[in-house]
Image (cartoon, grey):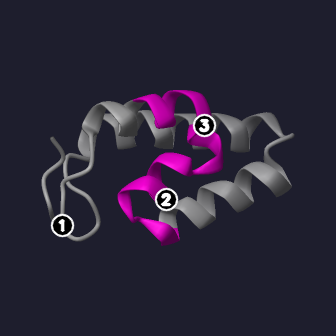
Amino acid sequence: MEPKSRLVYIILALFLGGFGVHNFYAGYTKNAVIQLLLTLFLGWTGIVALVVLVWVIIDIIQVSKDASGVPMK
């Protein structure tokens, strides 16, 4: 399996992170679904939007491997 691109992961997180697209890309489906549902159903509240934003920033900083454990290139 070819490794995922870290740059693509970061770009997806920056522009579509609230919808969990970056986590779908990396294979973290559970986290992606949670982010998507939080944004869709509670994103209009400021606190939930802020929580998801912080979560996306943490993802950008910490994630260096995809869900199967292959390091991103």
| Disc 1 residue crowd, few under 14, some 14–19, many 20+, Cα 10 Å | few
Q: How many marks?
A: 3
Tell me the quarter of the image containing the C terminus: top left
Residue 33 rendering spot, x and y as whole percentages? 61, 66
Residue designated by label 2:
24
Q: CA distance from mark 3 to mark 2?
A: 11 Å
Residue 7 rendering spot, x and y as whole percentages? 31, 30
Secondary structure character of the magenta stretch overall: helix
- Nearest to the observer: residue 54 or residue 68: 68
- Nearest to the observer: residue 63 or residue 43: 63
Q: Nearer the viewer, mark 2 or mark 1?
A: 1
Q: CA distance from mark 2 to mark 1?
A: 16 Å
Does residue 61 appear left or right of residue 58 in this picture?
left
Element at badge 3? Answer: helix
- Nearest to the observer: residue 34 or residue 47: 34
Q: Which mark is residue 1?
A: 1
- Residue 28 lies, with reference to residue 73, above or below; the image says below
Q: Which mark is residue 16?
A: 3
Element at badge 1? Answer: loop
Q: Check disc 3 and give the amino acid type.
A: Leu
Q: Nearer the viewer, mark 3 or mark 1?
A: 1
Of mark 3 and mark 1, the one earlier in the sequence is 1
Span highlighted in magenta in the image? 11-30
Q: Check disc 1 and give the amino acid type.
A: Met
- Residue 3 lies, with reference to residue 14, above or below; the image says below
Tell me the quarter of the image containing the N terminus: bottom left
Element at badge 2? Answer: helix
Of mark 3 and mark 2, the one earlier in the sequence is 3
Does residue 9 appear left or right of residue 19 in this picture?
left
- Nearest to the observer: residue 21 or residue 57: 21
Q: Check disc 2 and give the amino acid type.
A: Phe
Of mark 2 and mark 1, the one earlier in the sequence is 1
